[in-house]
Image: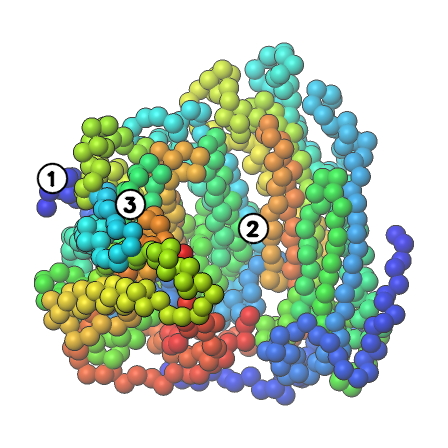
Amino acid sequence: MSDEANELARTTEHRLEELEKGLFTSDLSVNEFLLIKEVGYHPLGFVMGSSIYHTGIQTRKWSQSQELTKLTEAMYNARELAMSRMEDEAAQLGADGVVGVRLDVNYYEWGKDAAEFIAVGTAVKAEDGVSRLNKLGKPFTSDLSGQDFWTLLQTGYMPQGLVMGTCVYHIAHRGLGQTLQTTGQNMELPNFTQALYEARELAMTRMQDEANQLGASGIVGVRLEEKTHQWGSHTIEFLSLGTAVTKTADVVSLAKPITIISLDN
Amino acid sequence: MSTETPIPDGSTLRADVRLAMASLENPSTSHTSVASVTSDLSIDEELNLHAVGWQPVELVSGVSAFSVPSGLWNWGQGEIVGAIRAHENAFSHAILQLQRDAAQAGGHGVVGVRVERAVHPTHVEVSLVGTAVRPIGASAVDSLKVFTSDLSGRDFALLDAAGWQPLGLAHGASFVYAPRRQMSTVLAQQSQNVELTNFTNAIYEARETAMERLQAIALSLAGTGIVQVQVVEGPMSFASHAIGFATWGTVVRLTREAHQRVEPQMVMSMNDRASAFEATTLG
Amino acid sequence: MTSVSPDPQVPTGQGSFSSGLSVSDFAACLDMGLEPLGLVQGFCVMRSQPTMSQMSLSMGMTPYQPAPNDYVENYHCPHGIVSAEHRMWGQNYQQTWIERIWRQGFSSAYTRMLSEATTLHAHGIVGVFDNVTPLVQDGIVEFRMFGTAVRLKDHQSTSPPWSTYLAGQRLAKSFEAGFAPVSIVAAVSSVRVSASCVTQYAVEGTGSLLYGQGNDSFEIEQLVSARAAARGLVRQSVKSQLHADQLHGVELLMREHDFGHGDFEIQPVLRGNRVRRFKNFAALLAPRPTVTLS
């Protein structure tokens, strides 16, 4: 960890000390809080990690579809930094894991090409005292809500970590000649299709690699987000996120759900 | 424990409706209460409250506005103390007023508090509106003993069933100036992927101090936790070089010997989602 | 108040009905034994004319003298500065004329909706929807109300129809809980803030150094007091219409107009369902957390 990062840890220390005395903070709703208690966990504190990152400039070729590796790297590293700081906070609290993780990107007017990457969640600890740290010896992380966490544990699976893969891709503009030729026609644009395919594949594969590192048997709740951030419409970030899980116990008999049609508007 | 919820019977419902109609026409048969009650709780919330032995009393509110010394936002380093103090004061004064209003109506607490806050360059406003509640038939208490909470009536009842009790609203805010970068650094960093550590530091500190203030209030209320923590953050609309961070939540404490486990109920909604697939066009 | 006769085209309960209810609300209505008869509505357009007292309220003249029981608070300049630019006094006062016009508009629209329902031989109006907005200064404001008239089968009644904002399951639950709907209730209060010098400088952020308020943050008493008063007044006004009944599902809408220089007009609207208890009800089971699978 760099000196600056150590500095961060110091400002946080006092707050975390208070949390160690037994006070917990959590952005969970009451429903989620009770569900987490129900599966034998106690919330320890609201933990967060953040990193303000300046993304370098990369030239793009007007008419060529390609991955912008420098931007991909920046987006990935910044999120990793935020995540690992959040994990550090959780580890300091003696947590077994972090649930309800949210990853956000904030832009500030003063930082051109700079963005803040932030990860927040609620650190939890198993009440039976048995460690639930993941294969890497770190608290598990998961973007599952309290409800989903409860349901997942009922199935005998255990979250190992929030895994992600990203890919920033530049999609070629079409030449003027091409545009004129195809005006008025309904047709597939194969280069667009191809580019989108490739970018999504790259993001998904990277996410799966992360899950493999954790020795996970699967990923649940995968979301694929596409954002243009501040780069103009032809440069797109494909971000895939999910919670890596492994089977650790047999299925707890899952109560049969009551089927309802909500009559509230 | 029996978990069967009685299924409402259509025939008794119709009988109830007829009974209601008859009583409207013949006012002498209705069970008029001594004092009128106003509450912004929905009927479900009121029923939930009754289930744990509480009742709504009155719609109550607390407001405050504190001035911010002028010329504060534009220059400086570190925390913007004047704004932080204004925010803190406005929040705690509004809570005091809410407690007073509730105590006067005979409430022991306020649930479902709607928190509205606005930070202007010159002043900070906080407005709180909620419903005063009390254990059924209980007599009035001192205003300082009145708890405040932004939890809904349903959440209040849920917590109560699990052996927890809300103690009050905790809040914390922090405003900081964004650090400036030297011209030479800006140029050097132009084409690089780098973390801007001084910015990260500044924002970290703002968050941490705000959260610490939140926790300090929780500890002073002898709470063991804060649930449903809300966070509002970002650059101030009127001063882009200033960053604001505000947070609040309900302080809770376990009132029984141990947490009472409440078995969750799984429901499956048969309502369709609005749309499963959405195609977007490239620009 | 002139009377506007209800639309003669209103169907008389024969043949098909129209209703503003969603399918689930419609189903719940039938479940309660209430038959929808038709959509009923009421309108009223009001105009607020600035009165003499309002016009004399420009700064520099004497403070406004309100009626004995109205809310008023005076604030005096603590600086002792005599200048055309410096306000010598400030005042919060209740604008009863605005409240009166609003009350008139609301009740006219309501009465018209009710008379439409009466011609349908309805027993009640469910799912009322209105656009309750406070009057803008010098503005023309329309009060609109819609609802679905319903009738209880084989029931004879001579009293005017009841009304409620609720429809569907919520209304059914309310009946089961032992609450009979009486009527929708709404009220407005209007408080004008003519800022004193202290308030003006605090809101505008000027002169705090000039006039010796230093760098401290202080509570803007006049504004806080006006807001608290406006809320208190609107609550009082609604409670005066309850006659020992309860008001459920209250909504408090805050509207404020900023005139600049620290001057404000604060007009909260409070509305809800007036209900009457007709039986004691057995409490529900304690709630349980739910996990929604979808």
The residue wearing badge 2 is B60
Image height of A171 relative to B2, above or below: above
The residues bearing labels 2 and 1 have C-alpha atoms spaced at a distance of: 51 Å
Residue C43, image x and y in percent?
78, 58
Disc nearest the viewer among 2 and 1:
1
Which quarter of the rendering shows the C terminus of chain C?
Answer: bottom left
Under mark 2, the amino acid is Val
Position of B34 with respect to A90 (left or right) is right
Q: Is tag 3's residue or tag 1's residue first in the polypeptide sequence?
A: 1
Position of B250 with respect to C55 (left or right) is left
The residues bearing labels 3 and 1 have C-alpha atoms spaced at a distance of: 21 Å
Does residue B103 appear anywhere in the picture? Answer: no
Dot 1, how many residues are within 10 Å of its Cα: few (below 14), some (14-19), or many (20+)?
few
The residue wearing badge 3 is A115
On the same chain, marks 3 and 1? The answer is yes
Residue A144, image x and y in percent?
29, 67
Residue B62, image x and y in percent?
53, 44
Image height of A108 relative to B47, above or below: above
The residue wearing badge 1 is A3
Under mark 3, the amino acid is Ala
Q: Circle 3 — which element?
A: strand
Q: Please tell me in which quadrant of the rendered image residue C288 appears.
A: bottom left
The residues bearing labels 3 and 2 have C-alpha atoms spaced at a distance of: 42 Å
Under mark 1, the amino acid is Asp
